[in-house]
Amino acid sequence: MSDFQNESVQAGNDATGGDKIDGIVDQVRADIALGHADTDIAAELLERAKTSGVPLTEDEAGRIASEISGETPA
């Protein structure tokens, strides 16, 4: 086993597209909780999906962003 991670964790697993999106959503939620996420949640989701090679439409990102926004206290 290597001591270094040379590829994204998602690139090395067999998760479905939905599972990968769920993972991205979880990452964004955690980053928001820590104050490390972009204020444009939909854009953050789209960027992470693109980087991970996971298909995500703008409409889907907007819907998920609305759900996340509803979870975070103002």
Image: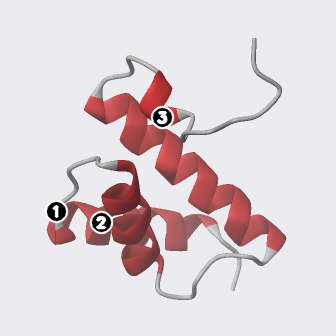
Q: Secondary structure at mark 3?
A: helix
Quadrant location of the N terminus in the rendered image: top right
Mark 2 residue crowding within 10 angstroms, few (<14) / some (14–19) / many (20+):
many
Q: Regarding mark 2 in the picture, which secondary structure is present there?
A: helix
CB within 8 Å, label 3 to label 2: no
Marks 3 and 1, how far apart in space?
A: 19 Å
Instruction: Answer left or right for 65 relative to 50.
Output: right
Spot occupied by residue 15 in the image (x, y as percentages of width and height):
39, 21
Q: Residue furthest top?
A: 1
In the image, what residue type sits under mark 3?
Gln
Numbered badge on residue 57: 1
Quadrant holding the C terminus: bottom right
Q: 36 and 3: which one is in front?
A: 3
Considering only vertical position in the picture, is 54 above or below 63? above
| Residue at 38%, 75% in the rendered image | 42
Q: Measuring 35% from the left and 56% from the top, which residue is drawn there?
A: 49
Labels 3 and 1 touching (C-beta < 8 A): no
Three-letter residue code for mark 1:
Thr
Residue 29 placement, left or right of 66: right
Give SS at disc 1: loop
Residue 4 % position (x, y): 77, 34
Residue 18 shows which numbered tag? none
At a point 82% along the width and 69% down the height, the residue shown is 34
Q: Mark 2 is on which residue type?
A: Ala
Q: Is residue 55 above or below residue 59?
A: above
Q: Front-most of 15 and 62? A: 15
Could you tell me residue 45's position as x and y percent? 41, 66
Q: Are marks 2 and 1 in contact (CB under 8 Å)?
A: yes
**Residue placed under numbered mark 2 in the picture:** 61
Does residue 13 appear to the left or right of 71 in the view shown?
Answer: left
Tag 3 residue: 10
